[in-house]
Amino acid sequence: MILRKEGTLSAGPKIGTGEGVAHSKRWYVAMTRMHHEKKVQEHLEKMGIESFIPVQQEIHQWSDRRKLVETVLLPMMVFVYVDPKERKEVLSLSTVSRYMVIRGESSPTVIPNDQMARFRFMLDYSEDVISMNSAPLARGEKVRVIKGPLTGLVGEFVTVNGKSKIAVRLNMLGCACADIPVGYVEPINH
């Protein structure tokens, strides 16, 4: 489990000893209006709430030009790292409609810290475009990347449409996948 460093902003004074405060925060997926992800993130920042939008740079080709464009990997979704009080505050924003929930359940889906850490690492260091695979993907061999920009990343080695990829699973969201040569990974034996 990854503990957040001290000094993160909080809304209001802490009551009690503060023991266990780090454990009460969790990652959730807040659903936003179309094209409002960055605006929601700005509001959350002003409220002192940690959030994350997975974005990546892509080159878009038009008939007359090419342009580097920042695209949102998961449209209409903002990851928020909140405690129960902050979770309610996020819903106070008019551009946030709800939290992602598992069908048939009432409480929001939690994205485990280790999944978020691997996902963010992949986005930060991959030289290739990350694709989200929401279709069920057969479990791959558990591997660690030993060469290239993703060195140290632990994930699953899978084949998608004949291409070798490293995949990081995210609860309810599917898998984030990046191309990777076979020689860049080693199996993890447990």
Image (cartoon, rainbow, N blue to C red):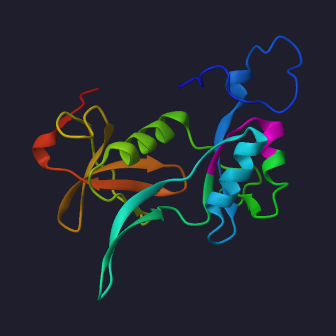
Is residue 112 found left or right of 188 in the rendered image? right
Q: Residue at x 24, y 31 (%)?
A: 188
- Where is residue 160 shown, x and y percent of the image? 25, 63
Q: Nearer the viewer, residue 58 or 85?
A: 58
| View extreme (bottom): residue | 63
The magenta-colored residue range is 79-87
- Where is residue 36 shown, x and y percent of the image? 66, 66
For residue 18, which quarter of the picture? top right
| View extreme (top): residue | 17
For residue 104, which quarter of the picture? bottom right
Q: Residue at x 68, y 23 (%)?
A: 22
Q: Nearer the viewer, residue 68 or 30?
A: 68
Is residue 85 highlighted in magenta?
yes
128 over 60 or under it: above or below: above
- Where is residue 126 shown, x and y percent of the image? 30, 48
Q: Nearer the viewer, residue 137 or 15?
A: 15
Q: Residue at x 45, y 43 (%)?
A: 120
For residue 144, which quarter of the picture? top left
In which quadrant will I find the C terminus? top left
Q: Residue at x 83, y 33 (%)?
A: 11
